[in-house]
Image: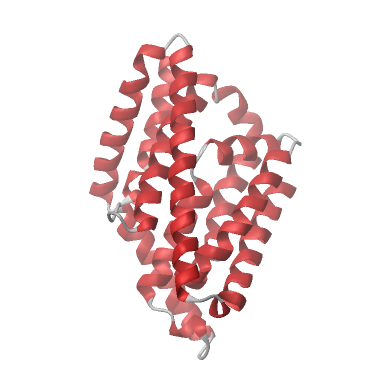
Amino acid sequence: MNGVFLNIITVIAGTALGLVFGKLIPERFRQIAFFAIGSCTIAFGAITTVDGFADLSAGRVGSFAALVLVTSLVSGSLFGELLRIEQRIEGLGGWLHRLLKKRFKRGDQADSSPSTFAEGFMTASIFFCVGAMTVMGSIQAGLGDPSTLYLKSLLDGISAIFLTTALGIGVGFSAFSVFIIQGGLAVFAGFLKGFLTSAVMASISLVGGTMLIALGIDIIGIKKMKVGNMLPALLIAVLLGWLLGL
């Protein structure tokens, strides 16, 4: 669990640095940094998607790669829209904001708007917790090898600084999401290791990478993407990858 706790610490530390030094960074620099993060998210998502497609195509279920992508994203997004997952995540962010506002009557924490707080919480949670690096890093950490999460912690800490300058303290509360998701994967690593076949991991990369592309588009502001409603697509991708790999 050392890698998980380090990841939580770097997210919180990055948020703290963003809050402290954010005001010292001119708005035009913050905008270009945020644009750069969005662009990097799109690029990383594209690379992850291509890698997932290549890995899935190289296996004996290769002809089903496109089917996994389309079926997972379409059905998962529809299911997420039906459950209003993004709205519920934003509601959780709003609740955390109100709780924080009661605790701190003054300061930037109280001045930030509930919508910005919720957006920061949701965007950072998806940014830090979606992707094969999260899954495999957490599994490896649970089995005694935290090296992947050490690298992820460094990347997340740097990203948290710039995300915080634009989205505020809500980014820091995504540490709860990191703890729940990565901690849960690490705890159940022994059980999940046998389940996460190459086809399952390739499916996660394929669908998770595409979701990161959508998140990058949303971060840049090209178009508002309800990435939160796409989260069930990951579960469907895991199921399809497992079934096709039998």
Seen from this angle, which residue lies furthest top?
60
Q: Is residue 126 above or below residue 201?
A: below
212 horizontally vs 1: left or right: left
Q: Position of residue 58 (x, y in %)?
A: 48, 13
Res 245 seen here: no
Q: Residue at x 27, y 50 (%)?
A: 83
Place of residue 90 in the rendered image (x, y in percent of width and height, measured from the top left): 36, 63
Q: Quadrant of the rendered structure where residue 31 is? A: bottom left
How many numbered discs?
Answer: 0
Q: Position of residue 151 (x, y in %)?
A: 68, 45
Name the residue furthest bottom.
106
Q: Which residue is painted at 32% across and 48% down in the image? A: 229
Q: Please indicate whether residue 56 sits to the left or right of residue 178 in the image.
A: left
Q: Nearer the viewer, residue 48 or 85?
A: 48
Residue sitting at 53 percent across and 35 percent down?
Answer: 132
Residue 143 in the figure: left or right of residue 71: right
Q: Is residue 59 left or right of residue 17?
A: left
Q: Nearer the viewer, residue 25 or 78?
A: 25
Q: Where, by quadrant of the figure, is residue 11 drawn? A: bottom right
In the rendered image, the vertical position of residue 158 relative to residue 50, given as above or below? below
Give the image quarter of residue 239: top left
Image position, residue 207 (x, y; %):
40, 34
What coloring was used for the rendering? secondary structure
Q: Could you tell me if residue 222 is visible in this image?
A: yes
Front residue (pair 43, 105): 43
- The residue at the point 59 percent across, 40 percent down is 185
Report the front residue among 242 and 45: 45
Using the image, determine if residue 28 lies above or below residue 43: below
